[in-house]
Image (cartoon, rainbow, N blue to C red):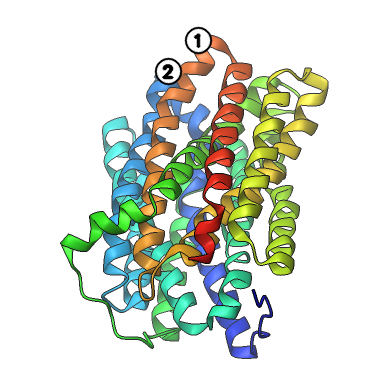
Amino acid sequence: MNTAQSPLTRHQNLLVGALCTTYGLLYLGRVNISVVLPLLAIELDVSRAQIGILGTVFFWTYGIGNFVNGQLGSQVNPVRLVALGLLVTALVNLAFGFQTSLVMMLALWAVNGLAQSTGWPPMLRILSERLDPSQVKRASTLLPFSYVIGTMVTWSLLGALAAEVNWRIAFWIPGLILLLTATLWWKAGLATPVAASSAFRLSAILPEARGVAFALLVAGLAGFVRNGSIIWLPSYILDSELVSPHLVGAVAALTQVVAIPGLILAHQLVRRKSRALATAALLLGATGLAFVLLAYSTIALSLVVLCLSMMLLGGAFGLVTSSMPLVLAAKGRASSIAGTLNMMATFAGGLAGFSIGGLVEASGWSAVFALWGILLLLAATVTWRYRSEEDE
């Protein structure tokens, strides 16, 4: 196999940078909910399992939206689709900051899930059309940096502001920033389609899904862990009482900072070997073992092992959501496959919204980490079994 890759041009580097920046900013209006869940539970006088339904509603509507917008992203101008999502999620966040009812919060966060789903699939279409095949794998390992850095900034900045000022500010600030981002994205005319949009054929969806069935399973297993950690890790850090409540957001952000070396590791391995699926299997397995170890770690060691787990998970999940759809998709179907895999990852993440909250209350955090470890080891086994699909 020829693994030589052409260097990206200056224009292509700017394009990848613009995509990463925009998607990272979307996370300001998405993972901000995580750092205020305990505060919302207290203010609304509900249990953690009940407040965790916010995460469930978001991930399930986000999952449906990923499937729908994955298909739309293969047919319409992806720039307009992304711009619409930026605008809607900005307005939702601004409105959320004024709410006092859990029912209204659920409705708004459900809409936010649909709006956020207009980002990833159309962006992968842009990437696949603007880069040649020899560049796509390498560039695909760069996109996950966007949501890791976006989560890190959101948790550290908005977590501190929510604790010091008011939880509502954690939604108003992202709303204003995303309004500006939507305007800039629309005016930039970043990347109009360079290939003819594929026609929508309902009869093709099921065979296409069957062709990537193993990837759907892996995305679901990995999504349950990764998206569950996004929802609940700040609460675990608060429960551990290792840091002041005012530092919970900053320490939670540290678990995202350590994901960056994992992304770099994944990028370097794929760049050298050009084997995205095999690399994903190895990182998923290593992450699973780390979470199992975390389940039996002492409080003194738990933060260190948690950081190791999140570092490996960052690299593994990035390959599952970015590289995997690009290496498995037929020509012109990158947006559709990415949307379908993201749908599975986020539906599974929605299950984590309420189930992890209930598991913590019933059996504690050790049970959660053991479950995450077992699921990732299963995902690793399946990915390794089908690693040869990358060559077909």
Disc sitting over residue 362 in the figure = 1
Instruction: Point out residue 346 in the picture as x, y percentages from the top left corner.
Output: 41, 44
282 over 25 or under it: above or below: above
| Amino acid on which the number 1 mark rests in the picture | Ala
Visible in this render: residue 95?
A: no
22 over 360 or under it: above or below: below
Q: Please state if 237 lies on the left or on the right of 61 as rendered.
A: right
Which residue is depicted at the point 57% across and 49% down?
A: 317
Which residue is depicted at the point 36% across and 84% down?
A: 193
Which residue is depicted at the point 56% across and 68% down?
A: 20
Local secondary structure at mark 1: helix
Camera-side residue: 171 or 197?
Answer: 197
| Amino acid on which the number 2 mark rests in the picture | Ser
Q: Residues within 10 Å of mark 1 (few under 14, many from 20)?
A: few
Residue 264, by quadrant, is bottom right
Which residue is depicted at the point 53% across and 79% down?
A: 133
Disc sitting over residue 47 in the figure = 2
Instruction: Point out residue 92 in the picture as x, y percentages from the top left corner.
Output: 34, 53
Residue 372, by quadrant, is top right
Instruction: Point out residue 227 in the picture as x, y percentages from the top left corner.
Output: 50, 40
